[in-house]
């Protein structure tokens, strides 16, 4: 992208310098500085226009900080489940706002009941992550200055701040 002049702007210090061949006329070596945060010129990929990130178990558990919404225990991913607050068997949607992280025991105990029917109370509430928060939830390796950039646009209501 740098070589094709496709970068509109960069943020922060370069994280890497790539050196190429020597120019016989100028006697200078080609050099490309790679920045951790870049803005691309031109068309925006279609997926950037999505309003909401796709729901997955690993991102849901990360949103909820791996804590069961009913008993409050912090669990490994293998012990957690995607719990539908309003059960799908009773018309509940498979959506960020109807999904919460629950341990296997609590999910099994609640079954296909509403929380109030099961006398189980949510310790925290669901929310739809922003697209920048989604990049963090995906759990890929994120450099410190990239994280700072992403967190700056994550709503203050996000659990990532807490
Ligand atoms: Zn639990």
Image: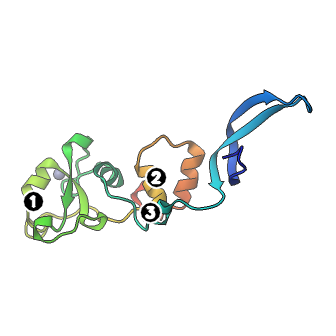
Judged from the image, the secondary structure of the residue bearing numbered disc 1 is: helix
Spatial CA distance of label 3 from label 1 is: 29 Å
Of 160 and 132, the residue lying toward us: 132
User: Can you give x and y, in whole percent of width and height, for residue 104 in the image?
Assistant: 14, 48
Query: Which residue is labeled 2 in the image?
Result: 135
Query: Which residue is labeled 1 in the image?
Result: 110
Query: Which residue is labeled 3 in the image?
Result: 130
Spatial CA distance of label 1 from label 2 is: 31 Å
Of 38 and 66, the residue lying toward us: 38
For the point 92% across and 31% down, which residue is it?
25
Spatial CA distance of label 2 from label 3 is: 9 Å
- Say if 77 sits above or below 118 in the image: above
* Earlier residue among tags 1 and 2: 1
Q: Tell me the tag on residue 74.
A: none
For disc 2, the neighbor class at 10 Å (few under 14, some 14 to 19, many from 20) is: some
User: Can you give x and y, in whole percent of width and height, for residue 37 in the image?
Assistant: 62, 49
For the point 54% across and 62% down, which residue is it?
153
Q: Nearer the viewer, mark 1 or mark 2?
A: 2
For disc 1, the neighbor class at 10 Å (few under 14, some 14 to 19, many from 20) is: many
User: Can you give x and y, in whole percent of width and height, for residue 103 in the image?
Assistant: 18, 49
Q: Quadrant of residue 116?
A: bottom left
């Amino acid at each position: 992208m740098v070589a094709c002049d496709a970068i509109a702007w960069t943020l922060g210090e370069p994280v890497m310098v790539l050196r190429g061949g020597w120019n016989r006329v100028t006697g200078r070596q080609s050099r490309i500085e790679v920045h951790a945060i870049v803005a691309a010129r031109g068309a925006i990929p279609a997926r950037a226009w999505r309003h909401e990130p796709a729901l997955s178990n690993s991102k849901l558990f990360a949103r909820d900080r791996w804590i069961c919404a009913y008993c409050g225990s912090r669990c490994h991913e293998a012990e957690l489940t995607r719990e539908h607050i309003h059960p799908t068997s009773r018309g509940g949607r498979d959506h960020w706002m109807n999904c919460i992280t629950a341990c296997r025991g609590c999910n099994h105990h609640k079954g296909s009941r509403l929380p109030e029917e099961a006398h189980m109370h949510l310790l925290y509430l669901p929310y739809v992550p922003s697209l920048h928060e989604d990049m963090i939830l995906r759990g890929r390796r994120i450099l410190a200055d990239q994280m700072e950039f992403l967190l700056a646009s994550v709503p203050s209501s996000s659990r990532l701040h807490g």
